[in-house]
Amino acid sequence: MAAPSKTSALPCDDFQKFQDTLRQLRLIDDRIIHALNDSLPTQSFRGKVDASSVCKRFYDELQIAYDQRKNAIQHCLEIASKEVDTLRQEKASNPDDFNTLKSLRKEQTKLRLMQQELSVEEVSKIEL
């Protein structure tokens, strides 16, 4: 089981793509039982495979996947937060601009949803 590559960054501008990419990055969690069954030796192969090194490698792959997802989500949160701040400044300078208000509300919603995804990431992380 391979961990997601570092090049798989979350698209921060489109929340639907953000969620779809995050779902793909979470496949390692969805397939954990299968991966463990494939990685750990059965009774008949115990002497031929070093179970502790297999477990260590599997643990390291999970940790890398968790760290990459968390860092990617935090990166998108920073971008969305900066965009909200920029739109707030625009709204403050022109309070009657409906398009700015609409964009601000959209970005605030996206920011809240991304914050929820970070919470989900912390809850769904398997404590090893």
Image (spheres, rainbow, N blue to C red):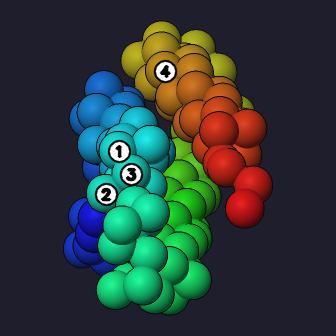
The answer to whether residue 7 is seen in the rendering is yes
Residue position marked by numbered label 2 in the rendering:
38
Local crowd size for mark 1, using a 10 Å CA cut-off: few (<14), some (14–19), many (≥20): few
Most foreground residue, 1 or 99: 1
Identify the residue at horizontal 59%, vertical 35% (top origin).
117
**SS for tag 3?**
helix
Callout 3 touching callout 1 (CB < 8 Å): yes
Callout 2 touching callout 1 (CB < 8 Å): yes
Task: Indicate left or right for 6 with 104 as reference.
Answer: left
Callout 2 touching callout 4 (CB < 8 Å): no
Cα distance between the residues tagged 4 and 1: 39 Å
Identify the residue at horizontal 35%, vertical 44% (top origin).
34
Mark 1 belongs to which amino acid? His
Task: Indicate left or right for 45 with 121 as reference.
Answer: left
Mark 2 belongs to which amino acid? Asp
Q: Residue 37: which disc? A: 3
* Disc with the residue nearer the chain's start (4 vs 1): 1
Most foreground residue, 58 or 5: 58
Cα distance between the residues tagged 2 and 1: 6 Å
**SS for tag 4?**
helix
Mark 3 belongs to which amino acid? Asn
Callout 2 touching callout 3 (CB < 8 Å): yes
Cα distance between the residues tagged 2 and 4: 44 Å
Residue position marked by numbered label 1 in the rendering:
34
Local crowd size for mark 4, using a 10 Å CA cut-off: few (<14), some (14–19), many (≥20): few
Q: Position of residue 81 (x, y in %)?
A: 62, 48
Local crowd size for mark 3, using a 10 Å CA cut-off: few (<14), some (14–19), many (≥20): few
* Disc with the residue nearer the chain's start (2 vs 4): 2
Identify the residue at horizontal 72%, vertical 62% (top origin).
128
